Amino acid sequence: MTAWHFFKHLNCTPALQLIRSSAFSLSRYSSSLFFVSIHTTAPDQWPPRAQIKNAHANSSTPSSSSLAVQSMASPVPVPANYVSVLLRCNKDISDMLAEALLSFGASSVTMNEDDVCPGTDEICVSSIFLEGEDINTSISYAADSIGLKEIPRYEVKILEEDDWMKGAQESFHPVEVTEGLWVVPKWTTPPDSQATNVILNPGLAFGTGDHPTTKLCLLLLHDCIKGGEYILDYGTGTGILAIAALKFGASFAVGVDIDSQAIASASQNATLNNIGPDKLQLHLIASQTSSSSRDEWPFSVVEGKNASEIETVTHKEKYDLVIANILLTPLLNLAHQIIFSAKPGAIIGLSGILSEQVENVLQNYSPFLEGIEVSKMDDWACVSGRKRKNIGIC
Amino acid sequence: MAAKEILTRRPVAATIKLTVPAGGARPAPPVGPALGQYRLNLMAFCKDFNARTQKYKPDTPMAVSITAFKDNTFEFTVKSPSVTWYLKKAAGIESGSGRPGHVTASTLSLKHVYEIAKVKQNDHYLQNMSLEAITKSIIGTANSMGIHIVRDLD
């Protein structure tokens, strides 16, 4: 596939324009070669599996950029073009300047504790701007709005998205959730080879075994699964719960999520744990709740598949155990689907909720569940119960 | 910085400020780059932030202030948008009046103000104020923006 399709529509010069227009920073970047990360202009399209890195561009003739395109097999998020701006300003006004920058187009502002310049009252404030923002204008408006007489000196650095993605992944270590159950990153050897080890490469999906809600759900699965069950994992993320359930002896699991990155991560993790499509199926569904409309879609829509697939995924009374580690609002909105898909007497586990939100969940689910238990860890809770046998839901 | 007062004695690496839509934190800009550079657990932040902002209408821009500690742990506080943001949204206008007191930008009813007050009461720095006091403060802000508050809109 040619990368030119991306670049015909892209204005690939925003980074170049701001370099030309900012008066101060060019001495460091006067060489004509630099690296930019480019992203497509349609952020809601799932990009084809290629990531564009290392575009060498000559600052005077941006149209003659040549590109190296690498394709990656692992889940690829939309590459983002963004810029880090380092400003110096007086310590007293740093807070105000931060707020002002945020109002005028910065996507985030960071004050590093160690960057207090010795001997002066100045402190370094770094700010991230996304592609398309006119940095010079934003900074001058921000400075103006707090009454500074002149624009503070600043430096511009272009950042690769890999910088932050790598940083985010570094926080994943092997976790012993309970005795005999470990969740291990793909790049580490399991500390206990005899234990049940769930191997994961999380990418940018949720579920590494570290979070209290994941642990609560894993413990619930560990206690409840006897063998041979059909599992539904709503909001599967990395697939950790579905995969663990299969390792505990369940015979078949279905994982659904509204995030395509989650499905990509989960399918990779299934392979890492030698689980094939005969044991685990993953489905991408569209989010039911859109922020603008209060009109509920009658059912989630399976992307690219026809309506009868929905029935297959959340089939009436098909599952012995339904686990949903999401958030309060989707749990309430999906209550019908969650109950509907469980067999009478099946176990239903709900998490991703704070302790203070348990009451709300109980109010909505207690008509349908019996034997309700609430387990807690830190500020988080998991509500579980069995579906009542005689409910008149069709 | 206000966040410092409630900190434990862990050494602070940085303070990060950004705006994130309620319930909409994702491991992508603006959250990704801002937190990733300090090796913070992105997914844990997203889960935590999203859970704590469930009570707000989705996509409401929340002002977040994150304190990143040197051991890669973090704490954060969340503030709902400013009263001016809510008033502009309720009135459907982009900016307040250029001449408040003389030129009215828009009109809102007490019911709007009351709804805004109920949301703002969730902000922890306002928890000690009575609903009535918050409402009065909002009316004051509305007046300074040239938004006229009436008892009932017909």
Image (cartoon, coloured by chain):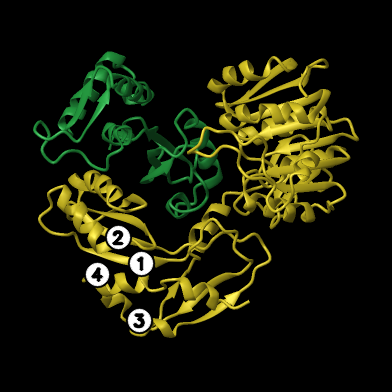
SS at circle 3? loop
Chain seen in green: B
Q: Are marks 4 and 2 on the same chain?
A: yes
Q: Amino acid at mark 1?
A: Lys
Q: CA distance from mark 1 to mark 3?
A: 15 Å
Q: Amino acid at mark 2?
A: Leu
Eye-nearest disc, 1 or 3: 3
Q: CA distance from mark 4 to mark 2?
A: 13 Å
| Badge 2 vs badge 1, beta-carbon distance below 8 Å | yes
In the image, is residue B149 above or below residue A19?
above
Pointer 4 residue: A22
Q: CA distance from mark 4 to mark 3?
A: 14 Å
- Pointer 3 indicates a residue of which chain? A
SS at circle 2? strand
Pointer 3 residue: A59
Q: Residue at x 69, y 27 (%)?
A: A336
- Near mark 3 (Cα within 10 A), the count class, few <14, some 14-19 or many ≥20, is many
* Picture coordinates of residue A55, whole percent (x, y): 48, 77
Pointer 2 residue: A86
Q: Say if residue A118 shows up in the picture.
A: no
Judging depth in this view, the residue of A350 and A296 nearest the camera is A296
Q: Are marks 4 and 3 on the same chain?
A: yes
Q: Residue at x 70, y 14 (%)?
A: A367
Q: Are marks 3 and 2 on the same chain?
A: yes
- Near mark 1 (Cα within 10 A), the count class, few <14, some 14-19 or many ≥20, is some
Pointer 1 residue: A157
Q: Quadrant of the N terminus of chain A?
A: bottom right
Chain seen in yellow: A
Q: Amino acid at mark 3?
A: Ser
Chain-order first, disc 2 or disc 1: 2
In the image, is residue A39 above or below residue A339?
below
